[in-house]
Amino acid sequence: MVQVDPRPQTGDTVTSVTATGSNSQSGSGDTRSKGLSGNSVGLLGSAVIGISTVAPVYCLTSTLGPTVGEVGVQMPAVFLAGFLPMLLVAFAYRELNKAVPDCGTSFTWTVKAFGPRIGWMCGWGLVIATIIVLSNLAGVATSFFYLLLGELTGSPTIAALDHNRIAHVLTCLAFIAVATAISYRGMTATKGVQYTLVGLQLAVLAVFVAMAVVKARSGDFAGSLHFSWTWLDPFAVKSFSSFTAGLSLSIFMFWGWDTCLTVNEETAGSEKTPGRAALLAMLVLIGSYLLTAVGSQMFAGVGSKGLGLGNPHTADNVFATLANPVMGTALGVLLFVAVLASAAASLQTTFIPVARTVLAMSTYEALPASFAKIHPRFRSPGKATIAAGVATGVFYAVMSFLSENVLIDTIYALGLMICFYYSITAFACAWYFRRELRNSVRDLFLKGVFPLLGGLLLASVFTKTLIDMWNPAYGSGSSVFGIGSVFIIGVGLLLLGVVLMLVMQRRSPAFFRGEILTRATPALVVEE
C-alpha cells in the first residue's frame, strides 16, 4: 500500500503516485512516498547544497599536499582527469533521476537495475563513504577551530590544543553533535545558512588565488614556480600507480555533488532540477580547483621542505601553512575562517545523503523499519540522522586512537568507497535503459555510452587502488600485521557491509527476494 502525505505542499504542487500496489506473488513493487517536505529547494539552492557538501576549501587544504606527493607538478592535470569520470557519471545520475526521482538514489536505482543484493551493497558504499567524510570534516573543523582561536588570541597554547588527542576528539564530537542537531531540523534549517557559507568560501578562495599568483610572479619567494601548460598533461605523471593514487584523491575532491540528487523528493521540479543543479555544482568545483591548484603551485612549489606542497609534515592541512605567507597576518585569518566555515557547512549538509539513503533503505525494508520515521514537525528523517551522527562520532574516535594519520588514511580509503558505489550506479544506468539506447543518439550517449565509460574508468581506479593499498607504503605508511592500514580500512568496511547485509537478509527476506522494489516499479512523480 502506498501512503501519500495528505497535507498540502508549498505552492500549487500536487503530488501524485502511479503505483501497481505491493504484491508478493507477482514480484511487483512501489516507490514510496517518505513524508519529506516537497518543494523546499530550487535550482540555486540545490546547487549550493551540492557545493557545500563537497566543501571545496576543506577538500583543497586536505588534498593538495597528498596529491602533489603522488604526482608532483601534474596536480592540475590529475584534477582534470578526476573531473572527467565524475562528469560522465553525473549524466547517469541525471537520467536515472528523471525516471525514478527517489531520495534513495544509488541504492534505489541499482536495486531496480541489478537486484536487491548489489543494490544493498551500493547503498552501503554510499552510507559508509559519507560517514568517513563526516569524520574527516569534523577533524578539519576542529583543527582550524583551534588554529583560528590561536591566531585571534595570539596564544600558541590554545592552538596546540589541536594536538591534544583527548581535547581534539571531544571537540570533534561536539561539532558532530551540533551538525546532527541542525540537520535534524530539516531542509529549511539546513539550507538557511548555506548561501552565506558557500559564498564566503568561494570569495576567500578567489582572494587567496589572486594573491598567490601575484606574489609568485614577483620572484621574492624561494620555491616559487612559473606557470607551465605542461602541468595540464596527465601523461607526464611518472608512473601509472602514482597516477591512480592521485586520481583517487582527485575523485574524493568531487564527492558530494550527488547530494543535489538525494534531495530530489524535496526539490521543486524533482525530475529535472536536481540533475541541472549537479552539473552546475561540478562546473563551479572544477573551476575553483584548477585555479587554486595552479596558484598554490606557483607560490609554494612542490618541494618536500618548508612551504613546498610536497612537505609531508603539512600535507594534511596545506592552508594552515600557506595562509599567512600568501595573505598576510590580517587577511590570513580569513582563510582559517573559510576552512572552518567550509568544514562546518559541509558537516551539516553531508548528513543529507546518508540520512536519506538510510531512510529509503528502511522504507523499502532493506534496513530496520524504525529508520523510516519522519519527524512530524521538521519533516526530516530524524532517527536516521541521529544514527548517522552517532556512527560518525564512534568511527572518528576509534580511528583517532588506532592511527596517528587517520585523516590521510581515511581519505585514501574514501576514494575506494566513492569509486565503488559511483561505478555501480553508472553501470546501473546503462543496464536500466538498455532497451531505450536505440531510440535516439541522445539516449545512446547520455543513457549508455557516457555512463558506461564513466563506470569503467571508476572501476579501473577502484581495482588498481585495491591492489596498491595492500602495500603499507600506501597512504600514511602505517600498517596492521604488515598490511597497509588503508587496505584494512577500505576492505574491512566493505566486508562489514556484507555481514550486515546477511543479517538483514534473515530479518527482511521479502526485500531480498525482490518483492519490494523491482525494475517495473513506477516512479513517484511530482507534477507542477
Image: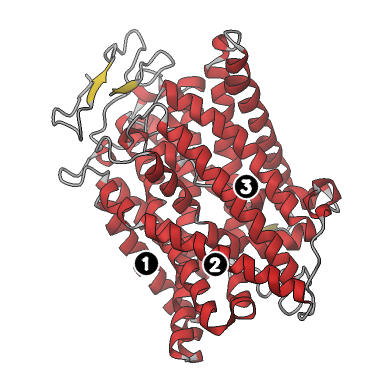
Provide the residue designation for mark 2.
402
Q: Nearer the viewer, residue 14 or 412?
A: 14
Provide the residue designation for mark 1.
175
Q: Residue at horizontal 69%, vertical 46%?
A: 80
Tell which circle, 1 or 2, labels the residue nearer the N-terminal end. Answer: 1
Q: Position of residue 187 (x, y in %)?
A: 29, 47
CA gap between label 3 and label 1 equals: 26 Å
Badge 3 local density, few (<14 within 10 Å), some, or many (20+)?
Answer: many
Taking the image as shown, residue 348 lies to the left or right of residue 296, namely left
Which kind of residue does numbered mark 2 sit on? Leu
Q: Position of residue 264 (x, y in %)?
A: 37, 34
Which dot, 2 or 3, sits closer to the camera? 3
Tell which circle, 3 or 1, labels the residue nearer the N-terminal end. Answer: 1
Taking the image as shown, residue 254 lies to the left or right of residue 338, namely right
The quarter of the image holding the N terminus is: top left
Secondary structure under badge 1?
helix
Residue 517 against residue 244 in the figure, above or below: above
Q: Nearer the viewer, residue 458 or 514?
A: 458
CA gap between label 2 and label 3 equals: 26 Å
Q: Position of residue 87 (x, y in %)?
A: 60, 37
Which kind of residue does numbered mark 3 sit on? Ile
Q: Residue at horizontal 66%, vertical 35%?
A: 459
Provide the residue designation for mark 3.
251
The quarter of the image holding the C terminus is: top left
